[in-house]
Image (tube, rainbow, N blue to C red):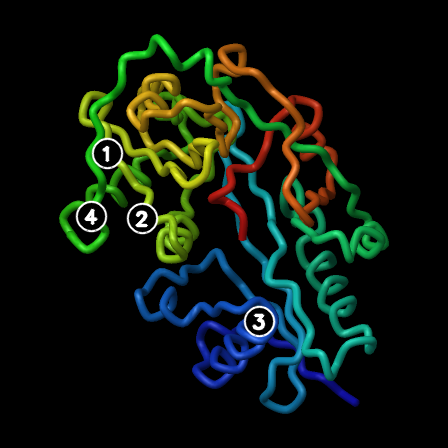
Amino acid sequence: MNYKYNTKVKENDALRASFNELTRKTFGFDFVNWYEAGQWGEFYIPHVLLDGDKVVSNVSVNLMQFDVAGVKKNYIQLGTVMTDEAYKGKGLNREIMERILEEYAGKVDGIYLFGNDSVLQYYPKFGFRPSKEYEYYLPADRLEDAAAYQLEKVDMQDMLQVEKLYAAMYAYKIVPESVNQNDAMYMNENVNLFQFWLGAGYGDHVFYLPEMDAYAIVDTEGATLRICQIFGKEEVDIARLAKAFGANAEAVLGYTPVQKEKFLVREHKEEDCTLFIMGEDLKCVEREKMMFPVLSHA
């Protein structure tokens, strides 16, 4: 059977609908609201195989621009890897993967993806290798004497507040004088991906720090305080931020801090999730004990 290859899903209503249907069947979500809000930008590019007009397999290319310790990097993150159950075992996903790797060979600084435990033997066949990530944290006893920041919860239904938040996200360009002083591996030029996560539940966890003119996305559920991302030009004191939430347990960062020496560090592990990398440049993640920000996952 001949399958048609297509990379213009976003622009085609019928293909986009079929793509969303397969995404719902596979992962339990879709990109309908993201698209209708005008937030599906140019950095998210599904690569699909079609049986007629039906999307039966996909690997999405995410164009990722990072500031890594002040240096501009262009990576590709692969995601939304899926094949319709009725079409598995036909090598469709392999065909897409091979086309993508050929298309971008030598054009980016590295390619990476996050795979589940069922595919640990699959991605190395294409030249990917597993990589460790590391997370930084403060134990509870490092939070006791901190003076809490004032916090204002951002109302995501208030468009004026939302526009100010987006402006803060857009503020960081890849030039030395405007590097985010909190995140040593900052995702640039991809507010659309941040917007996806805000629409997927993180919008309930956005706070403004007036003293620092900064925003923090903080997961306050559970005993551990998880600080997913900070948008601010000045360094935010994590102990003071944690104290503002009344934290009496450890505070864990969802990104790599610029001032690593202020934190304890350990290997970052997610259930059923392994980072796979391709390219010498990306070896810095394990070597320099870094992690991709949780809100940069596609």
Residue extending furthest toward the top:
145
Q: What's the residue at 73%, 39% (across, down)?
A: 279
Marks 4 and 1 in Cβ contact (< 8 Å): no
Mark 2 to mark 3: distance in Å?
33 Å
Crowd around label 1: few <14 · some 14–19 · many ≥20 (10 Å): many
Label 2: state its secondary structure.
helix
Q: Earlier in the sequence, mark 4 or mark 1?
A: 4
Work out how far the residue at label 4 is from the one at label 1, CA to CA, in angstroms.
Answer: 10 Å
Task: Name the residue carrying label 2.
Answer: 204
**Position of 233 relative to 207 (above/below):** above
Q: x, y percentage for residue 108?
A: 63, 45
Residue in the foreground of this view, choosing between 290 and 204: 204
In the rendered image, which residue does mark 1 sit on? 208
Task: Give the residue number, with chain letter if any, for mark 4.
Answer: 155
Residue at left 59%, top 44%? 75
**SS for dot 3:** loop
Looking at marks 3 and 4 on the same chain, the residue that comes earlier in the sequence is marked by: 3
Q: Could you classify mark 2 by the number of other residues whose Cα lies within 10 Å: few (under 14), some (14-19), or many (20 or more)?
A: some
State the residue position of label 3: 7
Q: Earlier in the sequence, mark 2 or mark 3?
A: 3
Between disc 1 and disc 3, whose residue precedes?
3
- Real-space Cα distance between discs 2 and 4? 8 Å
Residue 294 visible in the shown view: yes
Disc 4 element: loop
In the image, is 290 to the left or to the right of 226?
A: right
What's the residue type where badge 3 is placed?
Answer: Thr
